[in-house]
Structures are given as C-alpha cells and as structure tokens.
Amino acid sequence: MRRRLAASWPFSIESEVIRAYTGALGRHGATPQGVFWNSAASQNARFAALLAMIRAHRAETGTAGRLPLIADIGCGYGALYGYMRSRSDFAGWGYVGLDISPAMIRACQQRFASEAARFHLGATPRQPVDHALFSGTFNLCMIDDALRWQRYILDQLSACLPYCRQGMVLNLLCRRQRVITNNIFYADRQEIVAELRQRFGDVRIAETPGVKHDTTFLIPA
Ligand SMILES: C[S@@+](CC[C@H](N)C(=O)[O-])C[C@H]1O[C@@H](n2cnc3c(N)ncnc32)[C@H](O)[C@@H]1O
C-alpha cells in the first residue's frame, strides 16, 4: 500500500487530466476537439499570438539573427509543430514537444514518424531551449480548488524556467475572479499578473486577438 501511494502521489493532480485528454483523443482523434479546443481557428489564433510574442522578444533582445529552439510544453497531438512547419516565417526554428499524456506523445510520433524523436513524455524540457511555450496547457483542471491549481501552474512554470535561455510564453483563460467552471480554470487577471510578477519579476501581457477571455503572457528569463 505504501509503495502504491509513493508511486502515484507526485502525479495525482495530473492523473485525471491525463485520463480526460486520452479520452478526448480517443473520441476525436488528432483534431482540435481531441484537445478540447472549439475550433482550429481559436487554436491557430493562440499559436499566432504566442509566436508573435516570441518574435517581438527576440527582436527586443537582439537574438532575432540566430535560429531559436522552442519547447512546446503540453504539445497535444503536435498541432503547433504542423502550424510552424507550414509557415516560412518559422523555417529553421528548432522544436521539441513535451506532454504528460502518453497517448498524445504517441499521436505526435505517428503523425511525424520521421521526426518522432522531437516528442517526449514530460513537463519540463530535457535540454536548454530559447523559449518554452504553453498553449492551453493549464486550461483543463480536474480538481475543484482553483487556488491549488493556480499554485500548480506557478510551480510548473518555475520548474521550466531554468531550462529557458530567453523566457516562457503561455496563455490562460482569464475572468474578473479566479474560478473553475466545467473543469476549465479561469485566472483572475490582475491576481495572476501580480503572482507571476512576484515570482518571476518582469511579465508582459496581451489579450489574445480573436479569442474571448484568453490572455497571452511573456515571462522573460
Ligand atoms: C488544451 S491541450 C492543448 C494542446 C496543444 N498545445 C494545442 O494547442 O493543440 C493541453 C495539453 O497539455 C497537456 N498537459 C496538461 N498539463 C501538462 C503539464 N503540466 N505538462 C505538460 N503537458 C501538460 C495535456 O495532456 C494536453 O495534451
């Protein structure tokens, strides 16, 4: 009994999340609905906003001249990789995808079989990267304690930051109050900005164009 508890404890907050995503992928396949997005349009709008934030940061830090390596944390079935590959703006950008769901990583490795090694099970990069990117990674929440979930998000970001040479970009759904509704976490926008600043210092924010309630954040390293 003690051995079972010890093995499952660190991942308990994630086990139901993994189960929910595995179910969605089984029902809908490698589609936006398979990762609980409403549409490809909102999925792509989030990618565009996050990548625009990275590009602006690269320009600001004078690193735009060399090709970056991006870690896509919570990569799902690899939609961002497909998005970047189909746009010349991102030609030559390095990419690694990580996800805590084995089913999602298997889906990526099947979709991009010749590049299967880009995708790994996990929640933190295995190597130094320029930027870590999180799109929708923390939206689905299978507990009912919003403050605990918010601490979990902050801890996940803290664990990733040491691997990031330039910084991290993420999106979160935001409302006036921190709340979990239908298993979707909404941050209190003012509160989360204050928490991020307290933990990480400088933080930039922008509303995600075309996606209601969604905010894009940059945390410079
Ligand atoms: C809403 S889906 C978004 C997938 C992808 N980013 C996209 O936009 O198509 C969230 C993904 O994050 C993964 N995930 C959730 N929590 C995670 C964590 N702490 N670390 C890594 N992946 C996580 C889930 O398994 C799921 O595949």
Image: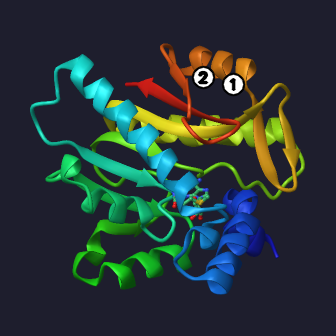
Side of 16 relative to 99 (left or right): right
Q: How many marks?
A: 2
Q: Identify the residue shown where x is 72% and y is 24%.
A: 189
Please tell me whether mark 1 sits on a helix, a strand or a loop.
Answer: helix
Q: Nearest the camera: 37 or 155?
A: 37
- Relative placement, left or right, of 172 versus 67 is right
Q: Quadrant of residue 209?
A: top right
- Look at the numbered discs 2 and 1 and tell me whether their residues touch, using CB distance below 8 Å: yes
Relative to 198, say whether 64 is above or below: below
Task: Return the mark for residue 134.
Answer: none
Amino acid type of disc 2?
Leu
The residue lying at 68 percent from left, 76 percent from top is 24
Q: Residue at x 46, y 27 (%)?
A: 218
Label 2 residue SS: helix
Q: Quadrant of the C terminus?
A: top left
The one nearer the camera, 6 or 213, is: 213
- State the quadrant of the N terminus: bottom right
Pick the front one: 171 or 162: 171
User: How many angstroms separate mark 2 from mark 1 (CA)?
Assistant: 6 Å
Q: Quadrant of residue 87?
A: bottom left
* Residue to which mark 2 is pinned: 196
Q: Which residue is mark 1?
A: 192
Q: Position of residue 149 (x, y in %)?
A: 76, 43
Question: x%, y% of residue 128?
Answer: 27, 44
Name the side, left or right, on which 113 lies relative to 183: left
Colouring scheme, one of rainbow, by chain, secondary structure, one colour: rainbow
For disc 1, the neighbor class at 10 Å (few under 14, some 14 to 19, many from 20) is some
Q: Is residue 209 above or below residue 40?
A: above
Residue in the picture at 25% in, 27% down? 58
Give amino acid for label 1. Ile
Name the quadrant containing residue 177: top right
> How far across and down, in percent of the image, does residue 35 sit?
61, 67
